[in-house]
Image: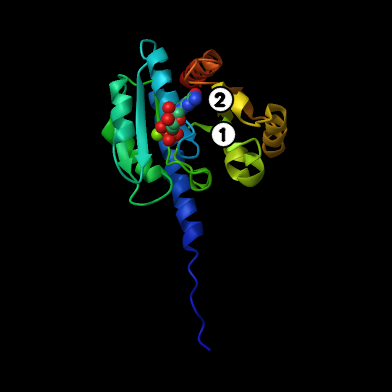
Amino acid sequence: MENVRVIEVKENVFASNIRNADELRARMRGEGCLLINLMSSPGSGKTTLLSATIDALKDEMGIGVIEADVDSAVDAKTIQMHGARAVQVHTGGMCHLDAGMCDQGLAELDTTGLDLVFIENVGNLICPAEFDTGAARKVMILSVPEGHDKPLKYPLIFEVSDLVLISKCDVAPYFDFDMEQLRKNVADRRRSSQILPLSAKTGEGMDAWLQWLRDEVAAWKQA
Ligand SMILES: Nc1nc2c(ncn2[C@@H]2O[C@H](COP(=O)(O)OP(=O)(O)O)[C@@H](O)[C@H]2O)c(=O)[nH]1
Ligand SMILES: [Mg+2]
């Protein structure tokens, strides 16, 4: 039987993406602009949180947002209404953003004068965790209605995230969400993860999130 050539496409795709991501990170460091990859399930509150964050910080720093979705431009329009620069990237059916797509988004956004750029990644707890976008920090949102067991079911996203935001805390009385169990489940995935419970609706916990952002932006500029 003739030998069949096997091409490890997945491995090559990952390797070249990591190279692109490292280059992009180095460039953003040179510009002193912090890129944050925000990941979560659809509907956990990414756009709502970004809108509240822009309202609170836009007079202190230049903020931009890359919105990644399979279709539509609704989130980019919402972000623009809150006074931040925004571009919508369509992923061509893909369930995540990679470093090449992120680079195109940044070129379109124009980072001149920006201190902080968020990627609102495609709503999904699996694929976005696998692909390095070139962001300096990874933040994920888990909303109260999704349940405290998700770190058990979707381990990778909890392993790669620097910060886990627990959103929609205002509706906690209606759900059996066990915060102590959640803390244990997250720590089992990544001991150094920070966890911040908040509600973009009531403003509870927002101060801690905003201070985390201020500290990270300042540290990135000094590094
Ligand atoms: N009760 C409550 N609802 C929220 C909160 N944040 C977002 N939502 C609602 O959750 C739904 C999805 O929010 P959205 O920001 O579009 O989620 P995304 O798909 O992750 O961007 C909307 O109906 C929001 O009003 C919150 O803190 N509390
Ligand atoms: Mg959204």
Q: Nearer the viewer, residue 200 or 134?
A: 200
Front one among 76 and 199:
199
54 in relation to 5, above or below: above
Please name the amino acid that badge 1 sits on.
Pro
Q: Is mark 2 within 8 Å of ligand 1?
A: yes
The image position of residue 145, as x and y in percent, is: 56, 34
- Residue 115 drawn at (x, y percent): 39, 20
Asked whether 61 or 181 is in front, the reply is: 181
Q: How many marks?
A: 2
The label number, if any, that marks residue 171 in the structure image? 2
Question: Is residue 46 among what the camera can see?
Answer: no
Q: Which residue was labeled with disc 1?
A: 145
Q: Are marks 1 and 2 in contact (CB under 8 Å)?
A: yes
Query: Residue 222: horizontal and vertical position, in percent?
Result: 49, 18
The percent coordinates of residue 46 (x first, y second) are 45, 30
Q: How far apart are the two marked residues, 1 and 2, measured between alpha carbons?
A: 8 Å
Can you tell which mark lies on residue 84?
Answer: none
Which residue occupies 30% across, 34% down? 74
**Relative to 148, is 29 on the left or the right?**
left
**Circle 2: element type:** helix
Residue visible at 36% across and 14% down? 58
Q: Amino acid at mark 2?
A: Val
